[in-house]
Image (tube, grey):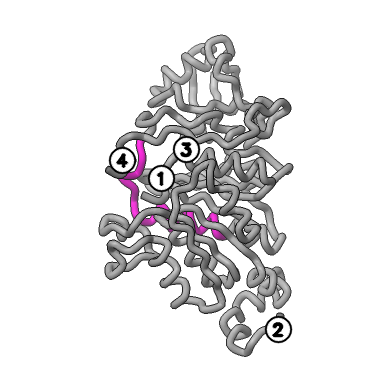
């Protein structure tokens, strides 16, 4: 792949970085990142990955854009209300960076489709930007079983957390949280609210992890949970061990197939 | 005795079990909190028997959903 003059200019601030350079930028353009959920976390993650020149971005989301999304889901505009989020996201990315091939999946992820979606373009890295625990555990288990790296994140109120899983290198999400909480026991953003910028901070950390993984630079949040408290303006990096009792990546794993957990009733669309 | 909970020093009058610690610290929805002590994730079934010792580094890890909706 040879860069055009326009690409040399577009990515000049990357190319000048010793750790990126022409070689790194080429890696980014040849890379494929799947973003599950085009909402609070997925929107900023997708936009920064697109701007960075990640060549293939997969967007998974069944929802349509709602007015109440626009306080934080910055990939969608007021004119997009009612439009499928994956289409709205694709349009914004195409306008921002024509180098990016956006693949859309207007679906909810489940045990029936997630492996096929990940296999579709053989994505290099997966970003969990979902809003519910069944999807978070599904993504974790699929990535562990398929040996794919991914970034977990969650945001609520003024709090956020994120960790990065790399096969064979550290704990998975299930090492820390064994099973999804029962439906309705742990509040969602819809029930509890979320400061709009939370996804911007945490989703951008997820995008940073994807870029670092693709470039093979720096230290990932593998074996760490990064927590962010916006009110205290405090980041903490908590060291996490691998859990030998983990049901999916421990010494005697019992989970070998994907599980569809029950979704909180209040989150289901009527 | 003094321990660290989520990065902050906390003084306790006496040794307590993990279950008691969750109660004393008024941790909301304690049944859904993962507890890590000195870089080890505890098995829930040990909460009632395992005691927290002077200098222990305790992390309460909370489920966090959110993202899309």
Q: CA distance from mark 1 to mark 2?
A: 41 Å
Q: CA distance from mark 1 to mark 4?
A: 10 Å
- Along the viewing direction, whichever of A126 and B55 lies nearer the viewer: A126
Q: Are marks 4 and 2 on the same chain?
A: yes
Q: Are marks 3 and 1 on the same chain?
A: no
- Along the viewing direction, whichever of A110 and A17 lies nearer the viewer: A110
Badge 3 element: helix
Which residue is disc 4 drawn over? A192
Question: Start and end of the magenta stretch?
Answer: A187-207
Viewer-nearest of discs 1 and 2 = 2
Tell me if label 4 and label 2 are in contact, CB under 8 Å: no
Q: Residue A173 at x, y = what percent? A: 58, 38
Which residue is disc 3 drawn over? A134
Viewer-nearest of discs 4 and 2 = 2
Which residue is disc 2 drawn over? A2
Q: CA distance from mark 4 to mark 3?
A: 18 Å
Residue B19 colored magenta? no
Q: Is residue A192 left or right of residue B30?
A: left
Q: Residue B63 at x, y = what percent? A: 46, 35
Viewer-nearest of discs 2 and 3 = 3
Residue A196 colored magenta? yes
Disc marking residue A109: none
At 69% across and 46% down in the image, what residue appears?
A147
At 45% across and 22% down in the image, what residue appears?
B31
């Amino acid at each position: 792949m040879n860069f055009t003059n326009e690409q040399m200019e577009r990515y000049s601030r990357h190319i000048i970085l010793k750790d990126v350079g022409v070689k790194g930028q080429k890696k980014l353009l040849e890379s494929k990142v799947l973003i599950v959920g085009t909402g609070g976390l997925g929107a900023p993650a997708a936009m920064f990955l697109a701007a960075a020149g990640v060549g293939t971005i997969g967007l998974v989301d069944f929802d349509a854009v709602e007015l109440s999304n626009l306080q934080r889901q910055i990939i969608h505009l007021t004119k997009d209300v009612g439009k499928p989020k994956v289409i709205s996201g694709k349009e914004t990315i195409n306008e921002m960076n024509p180098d990016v091939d956006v693949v859309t999946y207007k679906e909810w992820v489940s045990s029936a489709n997630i492996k096929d979606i990940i296999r579709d373009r053989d994505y290099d890295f997966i970003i969990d930007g979902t809003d519910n625990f069944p999807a978070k555990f599904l993504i974790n288990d699929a990535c562990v079983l398929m040996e794919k790296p991914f970034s977990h994140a969650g945001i609520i109120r003024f709090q956020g957390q994120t960790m990065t899983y790399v096969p064979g290198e550290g704990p998975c999400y299930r090492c820390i949280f064994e099973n999804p909480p029962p439906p309705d026991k742990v509040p969602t953003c819809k029930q509890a609210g979320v400061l709009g910028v939370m996804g911007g901070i945490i989703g951008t950390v997820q995008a940073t992890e994807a870029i670092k993984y693709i470039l093979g630079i720096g230290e990932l949040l593998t074996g760490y949970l990064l927590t962010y408290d916006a009110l205290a303006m405090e980041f903490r990096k908590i060291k996490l061990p691998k859990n030998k009792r983990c049901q999916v990546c421990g010494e005697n794993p019992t989970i070998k197939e994907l599980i569809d957990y029950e979704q909180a009733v209040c989150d289901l669309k009527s | 005795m003094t321990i660290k909970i989520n990065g902050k020093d906390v003084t306790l009058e006496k040794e307590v079990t993990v279950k008691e610690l969750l109660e004393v610290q008024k941790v909301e929805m304690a049944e859904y909190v993962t507890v890590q002590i000195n870089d080890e994730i505890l098995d829930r079934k040990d909460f009632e028997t395992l005691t927290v010792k002077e200098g222990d580094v305790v992390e309460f890890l909370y489920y966090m959903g959110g993202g899309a909706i």
